Image (spheres, rainbow, N blue to C red):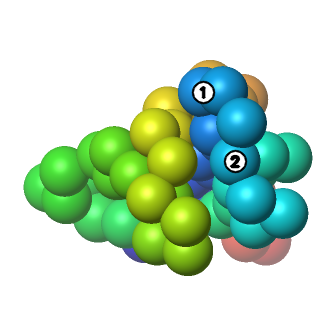
Amino acid sequence: MPTYIYKALDKGCEYCKDGFEVKQTLADKPIEKCPKCGAAVRKVPTAFTFQMKP
């Protein structure tokens, strides 16, 4: 299950102003509000990584 980082658009609480991680399936809708304070948040682009098992 992928982990996504969300960050507050403007002012947010301690939880969302620097970003927070959420595990979501690809079918889940993106989060629009911080679950702690209700501030608007957006998904932060991150690099895709994977590991090959020997």
Left or right of 14 on screen, residue 42: left
Q: Secondary structure at mark 2?
A: loop
Q: Secondary structure at mark 1?
A: loop
Q: Which mark is residue 9?
A: 1
In the rendering, at what x and y percent does residue 25 appear?
29, 64
Q: Nearer the viewer, residue 19 or 53?
A: 19
For the C terminus, the image quarter is: bottom right
For the N terminus, the image quarter is: bottom left
Amino acid type indicated by mark 1:
Leu
Quadrant of res 27: bottom left
In the image, what residue occupies the spot 45% across and 59% down?
38
Residue assigned mark 2: 12
In the image, what residue occupies the spot 65% across and 63% down?
21
In the rendering, at what x and y percent does residue 35 appear?
46, 71
| Residue 22 visible in image | no
Q: Dots 2 and 1: beta carbons under 8 Å?
A: yes
38 relative to 5, above or below: below
42 relative to 14, above or below: above
Q: Nearer the viewer, residue 3 or 22?
A: 22
Quadrant of res 11: top right
Q: Spatial distance from mark 2 to mark 1, Cα to Cα?
A: 8 Å
Amino acid type indicated by mark 2:
Gly
| Residue 21 visible in image | yes
Q: Nearer the viewer, residue 50 or 52?
A: 50
